[in-house]
Image (tube, rainbow, N blue to C red):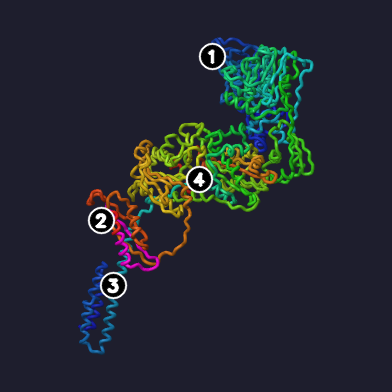
Amino acid sequence: MSLNDTLKNLRENGIDEAKRAQKLQELNDLRVNLLGKKGPITKALRGMKDIPAEQRPEIGTLANNVKKDIQAAIEEKMEELNQKLVAKKLEEETIDVTLPATKNNQGTKHILNQTIEDIEQFFIGLGYEVAGGYEVEEDHYNFERLNIPKNHPARDMQDTFYLSDELLMRTQTSAQEGRDMEAHDFTKGPLKMISPGVVYRRDDDDATHSHQFHQIEGLVVDKNISMADLKGTLDALCRHVFGPDREIRFRPSYFPFTEPSVEVDVSCFNCGGTGCRICKYTGWIEVLGAGLTHPNVLKMSGIDPNEYSGMAFGLGPERFAMLKYGVNDIRDFYLNDVRFLEQFKGVN
Amino acid sequence: MKISVNWLKEYIPVDHTVEEIANKVSLTGIESGPVKLGEELTDLVVGHITSVTPHPDSDHLKLCQVDVGEKEEIQIVCGAPNVAEDQYVIVALHGAHLPNGVRIKRGKLRGQESNGMICGLDEVGVPAQYMPKEFENGIYVFDEPQTPGQEVYDLLGLKDEMVDIDITPNRADTLGMRGAAWEIGATYDEKPKFTKPELNQDKLKDLTDVTATVEEKDLVPDYLLRELKGIKVAKSPLWMQRRLWNQNIKPVNSVVDAANYVMIEYGQPVQVYDLDKLPQKNLTVKLAHDGDKLILAETDKSLNHNDLVITSGDEVLGLAGIINGTKAAVDENTTNVLVEAGVFDGARVRKAAQRHDLRDDASNRFEKGVDNGIVSEALVRATQLIDQASDAKEISKEIIGNYTKAQPTVIKGSIKHINHLMGLQLSSDEILQIFDRLGFTSELSGDAVTITIPTRRWDMEIEADLVEEVNRIYGYENLPNTLPAGMETRGGYSAKRELSNKLRDALLASGLDEVINYSLLNKQEVDDFNILNSEYTKLLHPMTEDHEYLRNSLIPGLVRDVAYNQARKNDDLQLFEQARVFDRVTGNDRPKELPFISGAISGNVIEDAWNSDAKPVDFYYVKGIVEELLTYVNADAQFSFEATADYDNLHPGQTAKILANGQMVGIIGKLHPNYQKAHNVNDTFVFELNIDALFDLNTRNVKATSAPKYPEISRDLAILVEKDIENGQIIADIFSNGGKYLKDVKIFDVYEGKNIKPNHKSLGYHLVFLNPNDTLTDEEVEKAFTLVKDSLVQKFNVEIR
């Protein structure tokens, strides 16, 4: 057989063998066997010396092509086998995506703090500072400075935990008003603050009473503060908290440290004002108390009520959260059953 | 107080529904609700009993023939002991609806036909405790003939409609019908009309046998008496009785009822005394002697020197402004009576009523104030009513113990300022017209107004009060919504609060749920974790032992939460709280309020699931949370953990102080097994950090460096070391000898036990070297690594493995 024919035979057999291969290993072996230094092509080419010199280039080219063709056949088959392997692996790796996840939980912020921070953010956006105040407060700031002297009937409304004659657990975050007013430099602009925090009353704990609860006090003192400003501010707040379609209304009320004083109702977010169980069929829900700062309160902080006026409001995060989420028992906030706490993940 | 709409109509024309009135009054003045009595009642008419015969088969039942205004009389079987011929009574006809769903049907009682029911007052809705005593055990009988068949509702006030006003303490002026008429009238722009009470001039005499004395004139600005002689105590007229029982006042007799009626009408409490039962012909108002006794119907009260009392001779007749004893009570045999109207100091009355647990309609009014401009008139009115029903022979002039002329309040204001505070621009006419509706008189001079306030509105003092009156009557619903339009301000949190927020967010991200606990703890709880070593802060008058002390640690609350949850099978818990603890120094009354952040972790931190095995919490898990938390302090400080056995309720071998630059800022550890057992919690780890202390460290300034461009070289080191040498010591030594290119040291293996020398442990460390500015050579690293090893051998006698 001529060298020419030998090479062609090798090509034919090599390609045929590559196509028949079932495993990558077979192809690797085939490559080494056919194309390696000890392989038949190399061997055949040793016979070149017997070929006339003018034919040698032609045979050389043929030999290279044979190598290339076999190589190509092997690679093609390899690719085919690889794809099969990948497909098999993918099939093997297929999982049940409905199996439960590996838990990666963040914690849940307490719903009261979510409620408080939502309100804080609203007021920060309006330029209010957030002041903390003291939970142990002087009678002076908690009562006297709020126009509630000893023997004032309003002291009946909030029975107090005293620590001494002059020290008490604050009964209202309004206790912060006097401190903020006396600390504020009015030459630098108006006083705008909210003061969130814990307050205490001598109440027996039941579904609607707690000896400890939260309040957020708000106070603005400037030269031109009016009832209309108060109404606009609280209207915006209630829309922020209870939804953009809400309206508010003022009803006259009484607090010793504001005059005029009002209670603020928001239109029922459940029925939209037509009347339902939540709003006791009135269409309105009482949410907070407010008013213009009593001139005596301004005076006691060294502020001239003829020049300045103030507005103040106080709201209860517990009440807000109870209304908004339908919590029926205030004690739930303080029992900290994680099944209760975790339902509020991400609501605010 | 409940304002009867029918009664109100005597003063102002109102034809709105009670719901409308209540709503309007709520929006303009006082929180109110509509009350409709007897809505369910039907088919109740007057019956005239024409004959009563015994029931053939019963000892106590009677057969009554009753004229109910129809062609034929009906027979009703009645068992009431007081039923008798010729009575005018309440008949519930066949089909009548009574309170509580009771329905009357025709039927037979022991074989005798009964076509309805003859009713007692309580059966038609008058509360049993407020009906006249004589009808307590039987049917109600009208005093006077009525038309048979006529509906009984108006006669007895059974379907009265009332506005129930829930006053704030400043509006006690509406605790009388007349005050309420002014208030409701103002909202409807109707001025009430009142008839001035007058006494029968023929009976007025200069009687001088009785005197009134006031010892405490400061506490009793007004004290007036009138004497009526030769009266005949009777029953009050029905119109008065029905108004009283609808006010939850039991009608008694023509004298007592008149006094009560005037309190409702005028808001001025009035008392009556049987003159002939007085030890002396004198009433004196003074402070009691300690140990004096007030004799009441059901109980005696022991008095003290703070109690203002009415006395006669040596005897205490009553607590001023609150209640009278039985001593001089008016009864059916009384013929001479003293009527008293006074004003008593509100604070004094309030305290006495609280002290003796005797708060009532009278004390409620004096506490909140009464109109001292109408004391004299109210006394006249009470005297007139008594005379009308009891027919006095002689009436005295006013006997004065003390009298203070009531002065109207004058308030000056500015139209501009009033508008400015409302945020409105009303004309002076509009504003003055509102004052007029309220019955205030005003004078305008340019922008200045001078308003004269009648004494009935003693709550009015300053211009701000005028603002409220104008604004509420004008209508808050007519106010625009504006925002304060002053100079721009920068809102935000304090720096300390920002840090607290950041730390809370870090713990939330680590998977801890936030809790909020009570600040007040019991004694045991403040003892349990007094890590601050502070003096306790105790309430003067706690409600319960459970809430008696201010907390000095957040851990007791967290343990409660763990126990509460684990009792409910919520076993796997990761909780934290950010709140204040109270740290008091001996000698100070006031504790410092320190913001703390604390956590408790119990149960599994990796759950037992289809693809994972449960992993219970351990010290190092919690330490990891704390270390991550501490990075958020952004501290320019070195944090370290130092083992401690100082705390009784923490595990002595698994607890560490958390130090910043050597100063304690917190604690981390496992609860002591005994403590866990006592509190019914599973293995629980806690930590507590003082945010105040961390805040002071919050000073790190980050200057950015590029990520290193040169490769790291690492070396592993395995050593055998005595068991009680801490990892912290080894790491510190490695760092101090590792040279400037030693970047990180990690412990990757801790092993004791099999194949390890007794009392020794094997530790494996992974050291990472990096030169940020050049490629490190093996020689450089090997040199540093050798120094590290030599030092460990020398200092800790380790064996390099």
Return the chain for callout 4. A
Letter of the chain that mark 2 sits on in the rendering: B
Crowding near the residue tagged with mark 4, few <14, some 14–19, many ≥20 C-alpha atoms within 10 Å: many
Q: Which chain is mark 3 on?
A: A
The magenta segment is B761-789
User: Residue A113 has which mark?
Assistant: 4
Q: Earlier in the sequence, mark 2 or mark 1?
A: 1
Q: Is A98 positioned to the left or the right of B754 in the image?
A: right
Q: Nearer the viewer, mark 3 or mark 2?
A: 2
The residue indicated by pointer 1 is: B110
* Dot 1 amino acid type: Arg
Q: Quadrant of residue B187?
A: top right
The Cα atoms of the two marked residues, 4 and 1, are separated by 70 Å
Element at badge 3? helix
Asked whether, in this view, residue B361 is left or right of residue B546, the answer is right
Quadrant containing the C terminus of chain B in the rendered view: bottom left
Q: Name the amino acid type tagged 3.
A: Ile
* Residue B518 screen position, x and y as percent: 48, 38
Give the distance between the C-alpha atoms of the residues marked 4 and 2, in whole angstroms.
55 Å
- Which residue was labeled with disc 3? A74
Q: Which residue is mark 2?
A: B799
Task: Answer with left or right where residue B492 lies relative to residue B510.
Answer: right
- The kind of secondary structure element at disc 4 is helix
- Residues at marks 2 and 1 touching, judged by CB atoms closer than 8 Å: no
Marks 3 and 1, how far apart at CA: 117 Å
Type of residue at label 4? Asn
From the viewer's side, name the closer residue of B421 and A145.
Answer: A145
In this picture, residue B766 sits left or right of residue B254:
left
Magenta stretch: residue B771 in it?
Answer: yes
